[in-house]
Each structure stands twice: as C-alpha cells, then as structure tokens.
Image (cartoon, rainbow, N blue to C red):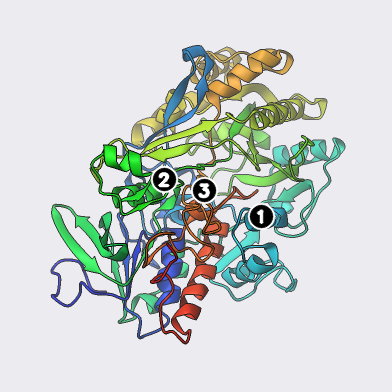
Amino acid sequence: MPQLSPIAPDAARFDVVILGGGSAGCVLAARLSEDPSRKVLLVEAGQDLRPGEMPPEIASPYPGRAYFNSAWTWSGLQVGMGKDPSNTGQATIRPYEQARILGGGSSINGIGANRGSPHDYAEWEAEGAAGWGWSDVLPYFRKLEQDLDLASDTERHGADGPLPIQRVPRSQHTPFARQVEAELDRQGYPAREDQNGAWEDGVFPITVNLDRSGRRTSTATVYLTQAVRARSNLTLWTGTEAERVLFDGKRAVGARLRRGHESLDVAAPLVIVSNGALHSPALLLRSGVGPGAALSQLGIPVVAPRAGVGRNLLEHPSIGVSAFIRPDVRLPTGEHYHIQSILRWSSGLEGTPPGDMHLAVNTRSGWHAVGHRIATLFNWVNKSYSQGSVTLASADPSARPVVDFRMLSDERDLVRLAQAFRLAAGVLRASSLDGMVLEAFPSTYSAQVKKLLQPSWRNGVLTALAGPVMDRVPLVRSRILAMAQEGNAPLDVLCQDDEALRMHLRRHVGGVWHPCGTCRLGAEDDPMAVCDPSGRVIGVEGLMVCDASVMPTIPCANLNVPVIMIAEKMSDGIRAASKAPSGRRAGVTASA
C-alpha cells in the first residue's frame, strides 16, 4: 500500500477522499474502489488493523479488553451525561470511549449485530429522509450480512455478505442466564429465535458479528480484505488526522490533514466525512459549516450556515442492576461472549413504539476476576427522545469537542428507565433465583469502576486477590461492592422510593456508546437538516457525511450494523450518480 511519507508529488489528488476509517469509512473505501477508474483515499487517525494480524484482545469473543484499551480510543474525551441533582443540577462529566483505530467501533465494540425495527426507518422517512424506509434499507441489511444460522430465510437474511452474523445458542447459556430467561418467561416474555426477524417482544439469543471460529469481525478486515487493499486505486493512510475540509467558495475541494508534525493538503472533487457522531459535526464546524453566530465567535469563517450541525445528539440512556452470583452458575473461564440473551419489551408509555425497551443479560461484568463473578441486567431505553449537542470551545483541531448528551432531559426517557430498573431488580430478587444471586445491588459506571476496568497488570493482580476472598467472606464482599457504588442507596430503597430512584437515575445514567443524529438527513428546506437524503451536505457542493451522525432519529438497535447499512446504501448512490447522463459524481452538486 502507498504510505503517507514520503509523499509522491502526484499522490495528493484523488477522486474521493474519505475522512474517517470507522465502520462506515471502510465500507465506503471498499465499495467505491471497486471501480478501478476511481482513485480513493481513506484517512484514519488510529492504527491499522490488518487481516490476519488482529490483536487477541480485539479478536476475542469477549470484548471487555478491547473497548476499554486506551490505545484504541480517543484520549481526553469527556462528556456531559445527565444532570446530577446532588450537584445543583450540573451535568455529570464522564469519560466516553470512542474508537480510534481502523474499523472504528466495529473493531472494539460489544459485537452486537441487530438492525432495529421497521418503525425506525418509517420514522426516518417521516423526518424527511426520503428513500430510507424499511423496504429501502432491508436489501442493504441483507447485502452486508452472511447469516450463519438463518441464511435460508432469504426474505429477511443474507448469505453472501462480508459480515458474518450468528446467534449465541441457548445450549451455551450459563445456568444463571437460563434461569433469568425462565423467570422472564414466567413474567410474560416468551422465548424468541431471531432478533433480526419479526419485530415482537420476547427473549432472544443475542445476535453478534462473530465468524465461524468465534472471532470478532471488523469492517477493517472483512471489507478491507487483502485483495481490496491491493487495489492500485485505493490508498490507505492511518495515523493521520483530518483538521478541516478545504473549500473554494462553497465547493469542497479537499482536506487538510496532519500526521505527527506534518501537515498536507489533499484534493478531491468529493469529500466524505465519516468521523462518527461526535467528531463529524466537530470537523464540519471547524470547516465553517454550522451555526453562523457560533462559528464567528470562534473566528471560523462561515462557509455555509447550517443550524443543525451538532444538534439532535441522541443516545440510548442506560442503567444496570448487578448481582454477585454463585460460582457454579457463572460464565466459564476463558474467552466467551458475555451477553447471552436480550429481552425486547414494550413500555406501553403513550406515544412510544412497540419494543422500545432493551435488557441485556450480561453473565460477566468485567475482564478481570471480580468482573467474572458479577452478572448484570443492563437496561437501556431503545427508543429515546432526549437530545444533546456537540459544540466547539476552540477552532484548534487538537481540542476535543464539547459534548452534552442531556440524558433524561425528556421525561419519557426517565419514566421508562425507572420502569426498566425495577423490572431488572425484580428479576434478580425473584424466588426462582434464590441461591444463585448472593448479593444484588445497583451498579454504576463510577470513577472507581472505570479505573478498575482499564486492562492492566495491577488491576489483574488486585482482582485476582480480591475475587476468592469475596467468594468466601460475605462481609468483605459487601464492603468492596459498596465502595464501587460510591454511596448509592440500597436496592430496596430504590425500588420503593420513587424520588430516590429518579435521583439515582439522573446521577448515574449512562449511555451504550451509541451516539448519533448530529448531522441528520432531512428535506432540503428543513432548516435543521444537515444532509439531504443522499448524504450530501446542504448548502455546499462536493461534501457528504456517512456515519451514525446522519440518523434522523435513534433506531432500536446497536448502531454498528445500521451504520454499515448506511454506508452500503450511500455507496450505491454515489456509484449510480457517477453513471448518470450528466456524468457528475454524487455529492459534487448539492442544492443551496
């Protein structure tokens, strides 16, 4: 592969420059370079992830060492979550992991592989994203997948796509998971077989992107295969950051990049921003596309005033209820996927769609010896309405964006997360789990927990010493768990006291690393839309966005597979436009 340094004099001009080599960027690079006449440059800030050279922490079916490894995430990214009622309503500031490696989230995420509901995509169309209804996107969900279980169901599933998808079979579920599933069945949630099948409530074996050997699959390896990387018209630069898009008037003509202390410009008639829902709006803002007054205050020349850039930030609000469980019902030691089943359920709250809630049965809560002893029922609001924002504090490309999720600012999210908390607590305290659950408690992503989740020799030793003692001495176990909870109210109090629970949720609400919506698709006359339904940025020429930021609303899904679908669909749109009679490539001409 051509490398950034030394730079050949003629290597700075391309037909397409893709800024960001995440889940979407790798798909775009692979699909657009299928045309040998199109020169494609893919730029990624993080390191390469080559086929056949995947680090064991990433390849493992247990993802807990990958997504908390600071070598593969952006450093210094802090975000506002909810408003802490114990701190005069100030936002709770927490670290927030975002991938910085080729393949993006697909290289380090939790490996969940689901699509969302038909209602989600009907909602996108209703928000102005014409051509993104369920019948429009289903062919691309089939195209991307190689379903290892249900490929014979050709109406719903694909057999020949790049991404292997399978379900964790019930025969492999732990005794704890099976008992939780039985308790949920007693509560009216029956066993279902296909999380990506008919949209209905029930308990499903989780669907994951693992290959036949049980290894993670990333778009960096299954789309950017050795054969694809060998294409003479595809150039891959890793370790390279995008500082801003370059414009000639209102036409994007390239990008300014930085690698170490070296800065260079690359030229292309089509620039595609694919930096994710937090960094894509930040890049547009630094480039002069966004709310005009805010840009002017930072001294950034306004190229196109688009009020919606960085607005409509969405996530899945989450909370956990955990249990220290008996040794013989735990996940076996070794490398095993830890989420074995999920519950899809409907809150019944007026105005919310069916299947708006999600509960994951986590049979392991950390990579280390203590996490191995703790199971978590991890709840999230799968159709959320609280909206946050991404803004800039500085025009400096090295500065991190200012992110405020404003979690639970919409009352509907708070009400439903309280329902979810009580459902999970009720399951763990049910008589059918007596003896399996040694101690149940409200779990949080506290600073102490965050510190302990970092893969390190020290944490490995500490937890290896603490784990067996926690098994044998209940008093020690309770004290260690209490320290990790940072003064949480007891589970009984939270289940009985509405106000105590609301305060707990506001203080400890988290996300699921599913940010989206900040450069949303919409009609060209919608003042808050950033991109038209093809992905072109409204008001400029030659610029597109393709990642989770374009989602008008958040789907009831883990976002990796929907993002890959978006990239497949937009790739087809670009190729179709390039073959149009006008001969103009998609994205080069957009309405003002």
Nearer to the camera, 529 or 135: 529
Tag 2: residue type?
Leu
Residue 348 left/right relative to 111: right
For label 3, the residue is 517
Graded by Cα atoms within 10 Å as few (under 14), some (14 to 19) or many (20 or more), the crowding at tag 2 reads many
Where residue 449 appears, x then y in whole percent? 46, 27
Quarter of the image for residue 472 reads top right
Q: Nearer the viewer, mark 1 or mark 2?
A: 1
Residue occupying the point 48% across, 72% down:
571
Q: Where residue 44 sits: x, y (%)?
A: 32, 59
Residue designated by label 2:
278
In the image, residue 96 lies at what x, y percent? 42, 37
Secondary structure category for the residue under label 3: loop
In this view, 527 is above or below 457? below
Marks 2 and 3 in Cβ contact (< 8 Å): no
Q: Which residue is mark 1?
A: 126
Camera-near label (2 vs 3) is 3
Graded by Cα atoms within 10 Å as few (under 14), some (14 to 19) or many (20 or more), the crowding at tag 1 reads some
Residue at horizontal 45%, vertical 48%? 277
**Which circle's residue, 2 or 3, is located before the other in the chain?**
2
- Regarding residue 286, the answer to whether it shows in the image is yes
Under circle 1, the secondary element is: helix
Distance from disc 2 to disc 3, alpha carbons, whole Å, reads: 9 Å
Contact? badges 1 and 2 (CB < 8 Å): no
